Each structure stands twice: as C-alpha cells, then as structure tokens.
Amino acid sequence: MTDHARLRDDIAYVRAAAEQSTTVPVPAIHFLWALLVFVGFGLVDVVDDGRWIGGYWALAGPAGFGLSAWIGRRADRQAGRIDRKAGLRHVLHWATFMSAGVLGLALVQAGHLTWRGFGSLWVLLAALTYVQAGLHLERSLLPVGLLLAGGFLVTLWLPGFGWTATGTLLAIALVATAFTGKQDREPAG
Amino acid sequence: MSPRGDPEVPALEDLALLHGPLEHRVRLAICVLLSRHDAMSFSGLKRVLGETDGSLGAHLRKLEDCGYLLVDRTYRDRRPVSWYHLSREGRDRLRRHLGILTQLIDQTGL
C-alpha cells in the first residue's frame, strides 16, 4: 500500500470511529415521554378542571426532565463515555423550552391568551424545541417535531379529542424513534 | 523547510510529527475519540474501535507512557473501570497532528 493510500485508509478508519461514538437515542427516555405525553394530552379532553392538567404538568414536567437527565447520564456511562458538555447542552436545550412555556403564563395573566390557547402554545413550543433538537442534538427527534407542528394545528381546529389524537400520535412517534438509532450499551470496564 | 512565505505548505519538521505516537491509526482514533468526549472507558473504546483487549491495551499504554493520556480507575458494580482522557499535552499534539494532516489533504486532494 502506498503512503497516499494508507493515509486515506487511516482517515476513513478514524472518521468511522468518530461517527460510531456519536450520541444515540436512549429508548427509556423516549418511552418515558411517550407515557407522560399520552396521559397529559389525553387529560385535556377528559378532565374539565384545568387545574388538574396544570397540576399534572407542573409535576410531570420537572420530574420527567430530571429523570431523563439521570437516565441519559447513566446510559452514557454504560456505553463507556462521559460527555459533560453534551449533557449540559441537552439540559439547557430542554430547560429553555420549559422556561419559555412557563413565561407563556404571562400571556394568560395579561388576558392575551385563553387557557386552551396556552395549551396549544406549549405544543407549538414543543414542536420548535423538538425540531431544533433534531437538527442539533439527535437526528431521530426531527420527525417528532414535525408531527408536533401538525398536532399544534389539530389542537386548534379539532375541538373534540384533538388533544388525545395528538398525544397518541406523539406517543407512537416517540416509541418509534426509540428504535431508529443503534443501541450502544455495554457494561463499562 | 516550507517555501518562504507559503504558510499553506507544511514544514519538514512539522511533517516529522506525523511519525510520532499518533502515526498508528488506532492511537490516532483513540485521541480523536477522547477529544470529542470528556472521558471514555476501556470497553467503550473497545466497542467503537473493534480492537482486541491486548491490542487496545498496548496502544493505550503507549499513549499513557508518552503523556498523551491520563487514566482514572474506578469501580462499577464491584468491577474495575478505567476511564481515559486526554492530557493537555495529548490535546496539543493531536491538534498539531490534525493540522498537518489537514494541510496534506488540502494539497493532495485525498
């Protein structure tokens, strides 16, 4: 093999190794959010008292966020890598979404938005956040974001069970994307 | 020596760097992987690189001896886990090595 060919071969080897070590979806996180979204969206159609829905998300949101961070960190360690910068990027990304959603409350308080509209705003913010996550963090989340964007319109124009339909679609999409990436967990050693 | 006034052409002393510890593609890949993550375990590197325990261990030892790598030994479920990360020197050497490789690739169109 000539030096030229060997160099090209070595570069291809290093590139393949680098691609192999990229972050992959952690199915447990997708399953967790599929469940939370399915229940939380379904509540909107079956519960009249908005306080139950707000209470559910006030608890499920931060709990799911914290649990996701813990599961992600554990999965990374099991895959044999520590990546604090990537972890911080994920935390900031999703924390920004939650902060924007909470700030949206000001629109309701100021009388510019109804509670039902506030729910749709959350779906729109979630769509944007998932699309951004698909573009910058984890490619498999891109279709979930696009589906959420469609779900946003459904929640506006389909009064009866639009939320349940959107939640069900989202849950299916999240479970499906849990299987789209390669699994890379082995005991660290 | 590079032609005067042409910073795009690597100097001979720079090219000599390519014959250091990072000349071997497995050692180069180890350093590239560790530059992308804070640390990787022995089995994490083994899974990605597909090397045998003996081969990977020898490459890691060589990089450690050269001062390119630092290792933290911990336990997980009572099993020892070795976490490797790049030293400051290792990071500098890798940056220079990749810089020269990039220059070569730009010139030869690899």
Image: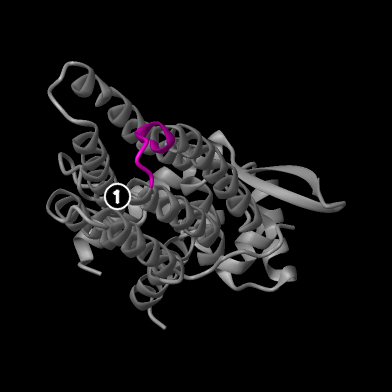
Q: Is residue A167 above or below residue B14?
A: below
- Residue A170 percent across, percent down from the top left: 34, 60
Along the line of sight, the residue nearer the viewer: A8 or A109: A109
Q: How is the image coloured?
A: one colour
Side of A117 where B44 appears, left or right: right
Question: Which chain's residue wears label 1?
Answer: A
How far across and down, in percent of the image, does residue A162 sit?
A: 24, 56
Q: Left or right? Give the position of A182 relative to A168.
A: right
Q: Is residue A134 magenta?
A: no
Q: Specify the amino acid type for callout 1.
A: Tyr
> Taking the image as drawn, is residue B12 in sight?
no
On the image, the x and y values in percent for residue A31 come to: 50, 59
Asked if residue A89 is positioned above or below residue B56 in the image, the reply reads above
Q: Which residue is mark 1?
A: A130
Q: In what quadrant of the picture does the N terminus of chain A appear?
A: bottom left
- Kindly identify the residue that appears in the image at 51 percent across and 62 percent down: A27
What segment carries the magenta color?
Answer: A47-53
From the viewer's perspective, is B34 left or right of A122?
Answer: right
